[in-house]
Image (cartoon, rainbow, N blue to C red):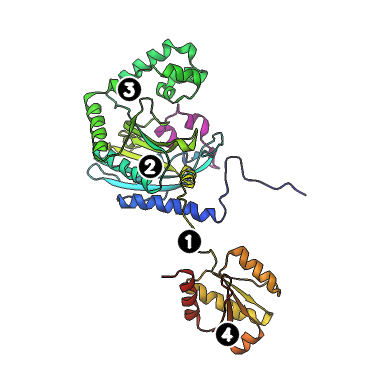
Amino acid sequence: MSLPIRAPRGVKDIIPPDAIRFEKIFEDTTGILETGGFQKILLPLFESATLFSRSIGGATDIVEKEMYTFEDKGGDLFALRPEGTASLLRAAIEHHLVDPGKIVRLSYGGPMFRHERPQAGRLRQFHQIGAEILGPLTPSDDVDLISLIHRMAVSFSIPSWRLLLNNMGCSVCRPSYREALVLYLSQHEQSLCPTCRHRTKVNPLRVLDCKTPSCQNILETVPRITDFLCPKSQSHFEQVKSELDSLDIPYTLSHQLVRGLDYYTETTFEFVSDALGAQSTWAAGGRYDGLCQELGGPDIPGFGFAAGVERLWLLREKAGTLPVVASPPVWMTVFPLMTEARPSALKLIRNLRENSIPTTGFFGSVKIKSAFRQAEREGSRFIAFIGEDELRSETVLIKDLKTGEQTSYPIKEFSFIAQNIRKTILPA
């Protein structure tokens, strides 16, 4: 006998009833974004690999190590999307949704793919919900979107959450910081891990992300990017902090917070929780003022974030706020007691479904015990029997599996049957 085929490493099946709760987390989060005026955009699962190398950065871990790429039959190189911002911007530019004179708010959601080492809260196929503001933005727009994520933290009772905040500077002040950072790292080259020695030459900001203990010791006294901000970036940062204070949204300055993508400028942030262990970040993002132009669009600012749905699940599970499946997935199981009753059973099933009653049929046995077991497996509240007596009297016998009460109904009174079932399942 052949060995069973299992899901690939880092890919997780989401089975009932968790699949319903998982989708409800999407709905809850998207609902909060909708109150902020964000409209949903549906994006393809794969794009030209060039899109991600141009936007994320060729020297990032995502592009160098983690992207799933493949060559199609025409010889073009594609990549399963590792994140959503680049795809959303590509679509917004291609379909002329962006314009220097207007602000557009777009949200997205779905699976992303990165070849990472799987662990709790980190999978190779994972799910994100994100949102982007594009147009003539101000620091207040940064704060406005951060305030929506803060609302998620409060609404979902995220345990032990904190907001980490930094400013990455701009094209004016970043070069002087890069120069100072490279000088500092070069002076401590022998203490850096091999990866960070390479990063010092090609992408020194990535060194600030390193979690290797030897590098962490060096980073304790690394130059702070906020000490190199030009007046414009400094003013931007001060306004963001001031307006967060005015909204009573607490934050912690994190001078090593650079995120794992090259396109960030100015404000960067992460919402973290100690309840997640090593994978503490559950939502993160920032400003990316030059990215739209880099991808062939107008020179307009952008600000966005992404939240990890698997991590939201873990946090809401710890908080006891996972969505509840309010009613059984199946309300009624219809069991014809004889072959001749099957046409009536099928008609009853169809009409109950048309009256919005989730209904299944059980046709493969004449044993009542088997029908009860099937109804129990499906979570049915009711089981309906159609036998010889019911065919003769044109009725159906319906049993409430919770109370044991049995009621006979005229089988053609589909609306009346549905109304009584609905009153029981969804009492006023």
Mark 3 in CB contact with mark 1 (< 8 angstroms): no
Residue at mark 1: 326
Residue at mark 2: 90
Q: Check disc 3: other Cα within 10 Å, few if <14, some if 14-19, many if 20+.
A: many
Query: 102 and 425: which one is in front?
Result: 425
Mark 1, secondary structure of its residue: loop
Mark 2 in CB contact with mark 4 (< 8 angstroms): no
Camera-nearest label, 2 or 4: 4
Question: Label 4 amino acid?
Answer: Thr
Among numbered discs 1 and 2, the one appearing first in the sequence: 2
Marks 3 and 1 sit apart, C-alpha to C-alpha, by 50 Å
* Span shown in magenta: 49-75
Among numbered discs 3 and 1, the one appearing first in the sequence: 3
**Where is residue 259, by image quadrant?**
top left
Query: 182 and 190: which one is in front?
Result: 190
Residue 152 horizontal side relative to residue 335, left or right: left
Mark 4, secondary structure of its residue: strand
Question: Label 2 amino acid?
Answer: Arg
Residue at mark 4: 395
Camera-nearest label, 3 or 4: 4
At horizontal 57% and vertical 70% (from top left) the residue drawn is 402
Residue reaching furthest right? 1
Q: Check disc 2: other Cα within 10 Å, few if <14, some if 14-19, many if 20+.
A: some
Question: Label 1 amino acid?
Answer: Ala
Residue reaching furthest bottom? 392
Residue 175 horizontal side relative to residue 390, left or right: left
Mark 3, secondary structure of its residue: helix
Which quadrant is home to the C terminus? bottom left
At horizontal 66% and vertical 71% (from top left) the residue drawn is 371
Tell me: residue 415, above or below residue 169: below
Would residue 65 be counted in the magenta stretch? yes
